[in-house]
Amino acid sequence: MPGRNGRKETLIGAVVVLAGGLLLALTTINRYEGEAPAGVYEVRAVFNRADGVGVGSEVRLAGIPVGKVVAHTLADTYRAEVTMRLDIPQELPDDTSAAIQTEGLLGSKYIELLTGGGGFGTIGSGERLDYTQDSVVIEDLMSKVVALAKTRRGLDPNRPAAEQVREHDAEARRKAQENRAAREQAEAERRAREQQAREAAEAETRRCAAAVHDWQACLARERTQAESAGTGWFLSPSHPVAWNGLRLAGVPRARPLSWALPPGQATALPSSDTPPDTPKDN
C-alpha cells in the first residue's frame, strides 16, 4: 500500500524536523545562559530597569559602537539581565561599568560601557559586570517637569502679595535714606551755629582786650599829664566808668591818678569825658 507508506514517511520527516528545531533552540538557550561560544567575547550586566533596551540595541565604548545586545532576560533576582556581544581587541577591566543612555531627548536607548582606572584584572567572556546604572525613564522625567510647572503656577496667586512686600520694603528703605539725610543736614547746621558762636565769642574777647589796652594807654597819658602839672583828679566810688561800651568799676575815693593799676582790674574813661576838678590841657 504505497499511499499509506507515503503518509508514514511524511509524518516521520515532520517529527525529525521538529526535533531538530527543538534541539537547535535548546542549544541557543544554553549558549546564552552558559559560556559564550568559542572566539566570541560576551559580558553580562544586571539593571533594576532596562526600559528601551532589547536584543539588537547598540553597545558603545567611549562613544564608539563596539557591539550589540544579544539577550535580554529576567535574572533570578527579578532584575533585567542583558547579555552584550562585543567586538574589541582585549577584555574589559574588572572595574568597567555599564549605563543605559538615551540618544538625544527622545531617541533610542543604548548601553555605554565606562572603563575605570584599570583594575587588577579583567572581565572574562560570559562574566557579569559589577557596576551598572539604570535607564532614565523620559516619561517619569517629563511628568516631574509638568508637576513642577503646575506647582509654580499654583504659587502665582501669591505673587501680588510678594510684589506688595517688595514695594513696602523699597518704601521703607527710601524713608530711611531721607531720615538719614535730614539728620545729617541738622547736624551740619548745628556745627555751623557752634562755629558762628565760637567766632563771635573770639571777636568779643578781642574787642574787650582792645578796649582795656586803649584805656590803659589813656590812663597812662592822663597820669603823665597830671604828674607834669603837679595836680591830681579823683573819681567817686559810686561813679561807674565805661570805655568803648565796656562797663567798668569806679576808682576808690581820694586816690590820685598816680596810683598803680591793680592787676586784673579794668577801669577806663571815655575819651570825651573829663574827670571833675581836673584842669584841662591848654
Image: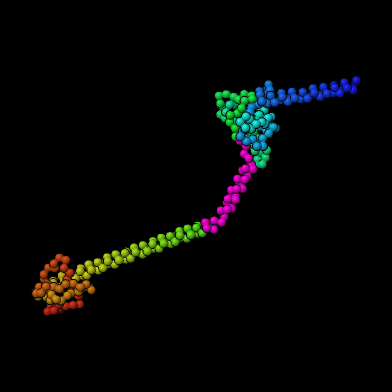
| Viewer-nearest residue: 26 or 99 | 26
Q: Residue at x 86, y 23 (%)?
A: 7
Q: Quadrant of the C terminus?
A: bottom left
| Viewer-nearest residue: 184 or 79 | 79
**Which quarter of the picture shows residue 122?**
top right
Question: Residue 20 lies in magenta, yes or no?
Answer: no
Q: Position of residue 119 (x, y in %)?
A: 56, 26
Q: Main secondary structure of the magenta part?
A: helix
Question: Residue 159 lies in magenta, yes or no?
Answer: yes
| Viewer-nearest residue: 101 or 116 | 101
Q: Position of residue 252 (x, y in %)?
A: 11, 73
Q: Quadrant of the N terminus?
A: top right
Q: Position of residue 257 (x, y in %)?
A: 12, 72
Q: Is residue 46 left or right of residue 5?
A: left
- Please tell me whether residue 191 is drawn above or below residue 92 in the rendered image: below
Colour scheme of the picture: rainbow
Q: Can residue 218 be seen in this snapshot?
A: no
- Please tell me whether residue 37 is drawn above or below residue 68 in the rendered image: above
**Which quarter of the picture shows residue 186?**
bottom left
- Please tell me whether residue 23 is drawn above or below residue 137 in the rendered image: above
**Which quarter of the picture shows residue 160?**
bottom right
Q: Is residue 252 left or right of residue 204?
A: left
Q: Residue at x 68, y 30 (%)?
A: 71
Q: Position of residue 260 (x, y in %)?
A: 12, 68
Residue interval drawn in magenta: 134-162
